[in-house]
Amino acid sequence: MTSDRKEPLFGPRLCNKTDELIELNGELGLFLCETSKLWITCQLPAMKTTGQCVSSFALMEKLKRKAKPHSFRNLKVVKSTLNFIRFEAELDSKTVLNHILNKFNKLSIKLSGFMETINVKVCKVKMGSTRHEWESFFRDNPAMNEMKPGLRPDTIHVENLPIKWFGDDTPKAHILLKAFEVFGEIRRFHIPLLDELNNDPFNASTSTSKGGGFKRFSFNESLNFDAFIMYRDYIGFVKAMDTLRGMKLVKKLNEANRYIEYDIKVDFDRTKHLSDKAIKQRQLARKYGVQNAEELKLFKEEVKKQRERYQERIKVLKARKKDAKRLLEVLFKKVDEEERERIALEEQKRHEIEVKERLLLEEMKLREKLLEKRREVLRHKLKQIGGLRSVALPASCSQTVKHKTSESVLYKNHKPTCKHYKPKSVIATSIQNKSNYS
């Protein structure tokens, strides 16, 4: 039977100060200590009797006795098959680890009930990811992009950080940044636990309460948290990965030479957690109260449907606008034609009036000239007849007067004013006498 499961990380443990401690942030009292773990693989002999089995507990006791004078801080089964049993052992220091490696090399264990011995193989536990692994991951994954933050090797994922070391009841962002900015400038960070606490209505109501008294217990409370930290430069990411790989977090207590250590796990981010798209999704989740991935999926589908309806509505409005614009163009064209026709008609009428006025003016001038000529002719004839110096003819007379009629009328209505005036008959008689005399 095969048993392969992921064991949780261990909680805080007391430890003494050693030379292997690496200072992370002296002001916060945080240090790093290398994790010393071994894989101990026991090759099982062939089972010749039905129902025969190997006790894992018996093997653990044998291994503990073989390790003396040293001891295992922790020894657990990580994988069990019909052919072998694999243990994970944690030791106090790197020196003890090297000693156990040399001691367990080519070790054989004899168990009761088995004729054959059990061979033991030991090796160091691989802790964290190497540079080759993250470079291969980001190079071979088509969804990644080295030109965009969050889609390239620039973000570390730190698991199992103790809340009390980075705040009182909740982790504080400024303490987290102060602890991890020693490796380089931080561009972005995210603490998922804070989102969970902000979305929890019971926690929001109890966290703002004042005064003394007991706090109600909640099963959602946690003693540790995870953090995603994105560095601005690649060198900062590399320093953080190389320094934190296979390390435990250690905090100094108030007592002299008393420290407490906490198992943490550091790896590069494979989930694009701090990419622009993921940040927008979380912002939408906080804005609209989406609690889990299923609700977020439903919310996205609803938003997609609303967007499609909105686009259809925009298309209808655009079509209506286009039709209205076309109708307005036809209407404006018709109004322009009517306006042009009206202006042309007014121009024609005005031109006809001007022509009529010009013709009337010319006719009046011709009549004045004609009347003036007639006056001159009449004056000339009267001078020839004699005695009449001036003839007054009304300027407003517009009827055509014949010569004979006008002369008879003038002579008939004329009253002589000159003393030398002689009637027509007298003039005619005198003319005749002169002719006879001659």
Image: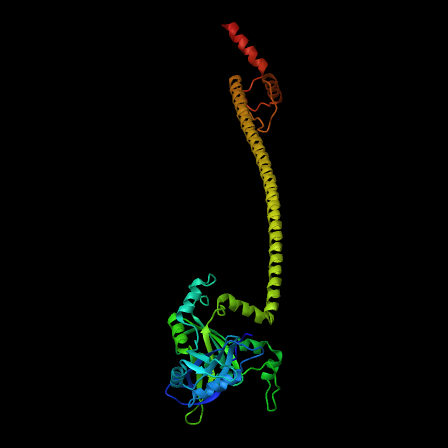
Kindly indicate the quadrant of the structure image that contains residue 180. Answer: bottom left
**Farthest bottom residue in view:** 256
Work out whether 188 lies above or below 369. Answer: below
Please report the residue visible at 55 percent of the width from the left and 20 percent of the height from the top. 421
The reply to whether residue 233 is in sight is: no
Q: Position of residue 255 (x, y in %)?
A: 44, 94
Describe the colour scheme in one phrase.
rainbow
Which image quarter is the N terminus in? bottom right
Figure label count: 0
Q: Is the residue 58 above or below the residue 364 in the image?
A: below
**In the image shown, does 275 or 258 lie closer to the viewer?**
258
Quadrant of the rendered structure where residue 28 is? bottom left
Most foreground residue, 56 or 246: 56
Rendered location of residue 213, percent (x, y): 61, 91
330 in relation to 151, above or below: above
Viewer-proximal residue, 118 or 198? Answer: 118
- Percent across and percent down for residue 165 are 48, 85
Q: Residue at x 36, y 87 (%)?
A: 19
On the question of residue 267 being in view, the answer is yes
Percent position of residue 171, x then y = 51, 81
